[in-house]
């Protein structure tokens, strides 16, 4: 899967999700080398941005499968309510970053 671990997710008996959350909280305390290593692997410093990117990817997949339409407000795709996500993006358009807006355009 193309995703990062959730907060309580374990991998090989280690709570990798908790470790990721700790790195985000302690970002300013990490050495430049530690930050660079995490950046090199594409570490998502913002969980919100990671979730947003995941939903965008799902929307892109949805549009590949359904080229002739957009999801309805209550439509789910791969267990995610992609329709309500689209509605929220339209409603929050002024709050999106320029990068997010460009990706949606």
Image: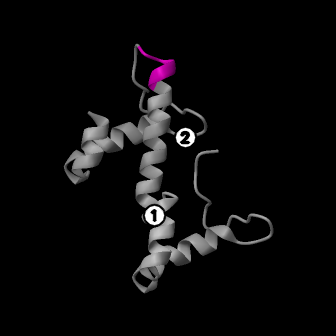
Q: Position of residue 7 (x, y in %)?
A: 61, 67
Q: Earlier in the sequence, mark 2 or mark 1?
A: 1
Residue stretch rendered in magenta on the structure: 63-67
Q: Position of residue 34 (x, y in %)?
A: 50, 76
User: Magenta stretch containing residue 90, yes or no?
Assistant: no
| Residue at 51% over, 19% down | 65
Using the numbered discs, state the Cα–Cα distance from disc 2 to disc 1 in whole angstroms. Answer: 28 Å
Give 46 or 39, whichever is nearer the viewer. 39
Drawn side of residue 89 relative to residue 27, left or right: left
Which residue is label 2 attached to? 80
Drawn side of residue 25 relative to residue 93, left or right: right
Circle on res. 97: none
* Residue 11 visible from this viewpoint: yes
Q: Position of residue 5 (x, y in %)?
A: 62, 60
- Helix, strand or loop for disc 1: helix
The outermost residue toward the right is: 13
| Residue at 45% over, 33% down | 59
Image quarter of the N terminus: top right
Name the chief secondary structure element in magenta: helix
The outermost residue toward the left is: 94
| Residue at 30% over, 46% down | 100
Which residue is label 1 attached to? 39
| Residue at 54% over, 72% down | 21
Q: Position of residue 27 (x, y in %)?
A: 43, 78
């Amino acid at each position: 899967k193309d995703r990062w671990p959730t907060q309580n997710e374990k991998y090989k008996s280690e709570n990798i999700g908790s470790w990721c959350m700790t790195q985000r909280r302690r970002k300013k305390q990490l050495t430049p080398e530690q930050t660079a290593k995490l950046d090199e692997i594409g570490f998502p410093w913002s969980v919100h941005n990671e979730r947003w990117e995941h939903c965008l990817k799902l929307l892109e997949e949805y549009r590949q499968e359904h080229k002739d339409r957009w999801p309805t407000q209550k439509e789910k795709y791969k267990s995610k309510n992609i329709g309500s996500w689209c509605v929220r993006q339209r409603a929050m358009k002024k709050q999106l970053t320029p990068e997010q807006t460009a990706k949606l355009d």
